[in-house]
Amino acid sequence: MVSCEQNEPAKQSVAQSQTAATENKTEKKLVKREIPSPVPLVYRDESAFHPALADTAAASQDSLVVPESSETVATSSSIESSSSEKVVVKNSPLVESSSSSAPPAPVFCENAPEEMLCDKRDGHLYRLVHIGNQIWMGQNLNYATHGSYCYEDKHENCKVFGRLYTWTSAMALDKSYATASAAGVIEKEHRGACPEGFHMPKDADFNTLVSYMKNNNRFPNERSGTALKMAFSWKYSEEWPAGTDRFGFGAMASGFRNAQGVFRELGHDADFWVAEESNNPSHAPYWNLYYDNDEFLGDYSKKKTYAYSVRCLKNKAADDKPHTEPNPEAEKAPEDSTAE
């Protein structure tokens, strides 16, 4: 017979094991709590579509700031769904503006990747896309000006979809032009709120974009709207399939803000101002993408106090060369993904 005293070491061993197991569980719980909040939703690897982005992360490890839950800056568009990212020069302050505030302090862009656009005014970094003989910003403008807004005044929406601008804000004109004609002040390549070297598009620029896509899409039945839309952010169904983003334009359903200050149609709609006016001086034309329409159309006009997205176009230069190849990855999409 084994005495109680002889069982004591065994009991102590079991107790120690149970205590160790409990401590391990506690440690695991603590480790789990320390996992940081996720970065904004990943929607695709841009480097697969745009080879110039493949080395962005490696080339700029010292200049790109990875966001955490309390941060307001974003990393390369190759790994995040942000409308734009920020490049930061060492020892240079970076200021992030709120939903509708004055422009931030200027920063420097020496460390920005050459194949991307760095806005020297605020450090935002944008993907560029060559479509025919045009060079577009591949993301919506996210430069804070008076008269620009984040959807529902939530900063996270600006990081993903860019800002929404009234027409006068997009054009960088006085508010008086919200009801008065600006015909005498609209320039041929009107910069507006765009970064240096870029300008607000006109109807003719969007017409050129649509014409090029129709003549160079290897899926001839695919309409312009489907070719411009990303699969990310859009409501879609069997009747209205997801976008293919065939040429890298990357249109997202960013919604809009109406004249009464109400935000609408996030996930359903994308609208882009142009540097032109309607017959009614208080209205301006814009181009529209809608989830249940597979065309990109510009026969629309709204009050200049509506707030829409802005896509900037690079100024014409003698050394600009056409780049006519659509996204190779997008070309692999099955034919049944195109709209009829």
Image: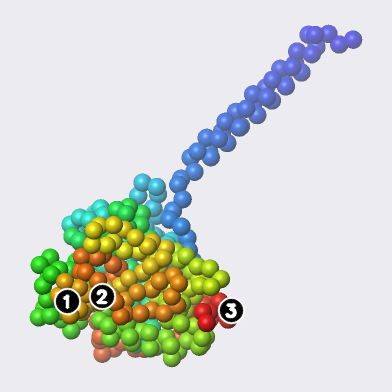
Residue 159 is at least partly visible in this image:
no
> Nearer the observer, disc 3 or disc 1?
1
Picture quadrant of residue 22: top right
Task: Relative to 259, say whether 323 is above or below.
Answer: below
How far apart in space, not on screen, are marks 3 and 1 (Cα)? 43 Å
**Foreground of the two, 75 or 257:** 257
Residue 253 in percent (x, y) is at 40, 66
Q: Secondary structure at mark 2?
A: strand
The residue wearing badge 2 is: 301
In the image shown, does 20 or 59 lie closer to the viewer?
Answer: 20
Q: Are marks 2 and 1 in contact (CB under 8 Å)?
A: yes
Q: Hey, what amino acid is under mark 1?
A: Asn
Could you tell me residue 49's position as x and y percent? 47, 75
- Residue 56: x and y in percent read 41, 67
Q: Sequence order check: which comes first, mark 3 or mark 1?
A: 1
The residue that label 3 is drawn on is 336
